[in-house]
Amino acid sequence: MVTAALARPRRRGMRESPGERAFGIGNVLFLLALVIVTIYPLLYILFASLSNATELTLHRGLLFAPIDLTFEAYRRVLQNPLILTGYRNTLFYVIAGTALNVVMTSLGAYALSRRNLLFKNHAMFFIVFTMFFSGGLIPTYLLVGQTLHMQDTVWALIIPGAVTTINLIIMRTAFLAVPVALEEAARIDGASDWRILLKIYLPLSWPVVAVMILFYGVAHWNSFFPALVYLRDRELYPLQLVLREILISSNVQNMTTDVSSGDVLAIGETIKYATIIVATLPILLVYPYLQRFFVKGVTIGAIKE
């Protein structure tokens, strides 16, 4: 990032003026400050989760390294059955939900990208309308929980959000960029719509598909409000809802049975930090592999017809 700021094209035989050099140095300093402001909160949480609980409560100010390095907080987090159950549930929601999202979004985008689709503009109007207006929480709860009988089921977290409007528009725009000649040649060869979608449109739009996987996967991983509304069975709680309970209620007695009452609050703080790291680490590990598709997929959504 910092190197890119300095890598500006220069004409051969021309030297940078003092103003250009000052501008480049200013960019570098600004980007360095932005990196520090972005990364340090994560580093602070990491250092705090690896610190001794009692000494951490006595420390005031910034952290630049763990205080009396210990993995006690992580041991207690991984021993908590509710967190492990939440991890298992969240993995299911992410995998099943993202798969359904990508399939439904691809089908919808392919249908809306057809140039001879009847009432296409009207359909797009009603789809975009949902970005600004919705039925509200209570009607949605009555529909999902009572009419569709999905309350206290895993489907309440997967089916209602099967398609996101902005992602549908991005993928539709990507499909519109595919040359019409490829589709016409495939139809001459007798290819069906399913074959055209699977063999032409999706392979040519793979960067956008990768971005859809990232968007939907992160959304499912971070989601807690639908579970808070529709789930009562703690065995179905996702990891983020478990994390929310720990952060808000500080109810960590079941993980601190072998410490004195005076240390409960201290160990609770480090457990909070360790839980945050456990909850965010998978996304931090997956993102670098999809990051190269990220910019291309997002910019495609800005292309106008």
Image (spheres, grey):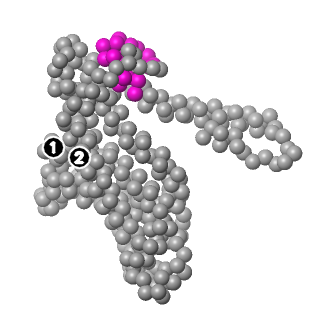
Q: Earlier in the sequence, mark 2 or mark 1?
A: 2
Q: Name the one closer to the observer, 37 or 272.
A: 272
Name the quadrant of the N terminus: top right
Q: Horizontally, is 167 left or right of 146 in the view?
A: right
Kind of residue at disc 1: Glu
Q: Tag 2, which secondary structure?
A: helix
Residue drawn at point x = 15 percent, y = 62 percent: 148
Q: Which residues are magenta?
A: 46-63
Q: Tag 1, which secondary structure?
A: helix
Q: Residue 151: x and y, percent?
A: 14, 53
Q: Residue 191: x and y, percent?
A: 42, 83
Q: Residue 264: x and y, percent?
A: 22, 18
Q: CA distance from mark 2 to mark 1?
A: 8 Å
**Residue 31 got which mark?**
none
Q: Name the one closer to the observer, 286 or 218.
A: 286
The residue indicated by pointer 2 is 89
The residue indicated by pointer 1 is 235
Residue drawn at point x = 42 percent, y = 41 percent: 284
Q: Residues within 10 Å of mark 1 (few under 14, many from 20)?
A: few
Kind of residue at disc 2: Asn
Q: Marks 2 and 1: CB-CB under 8 Å?
A: yes
Dividing the picture into quadrants, the one containing residue 76 is top left
Residue 128 seen in the current view: no
Q: Residue 276: x and y, percent?
A: 33, 33
Q: Name the one closer to the observer, 142 or 41.
A: 41
Q: Horizontally, is 28 left or right of 142 in the view?
A: right
Residue 154 seen in the current view: yes
Residue drawn at point x = 47 percent, y = 86 percent: 189
The vertical placement of 181 against 302, above or below, is: below
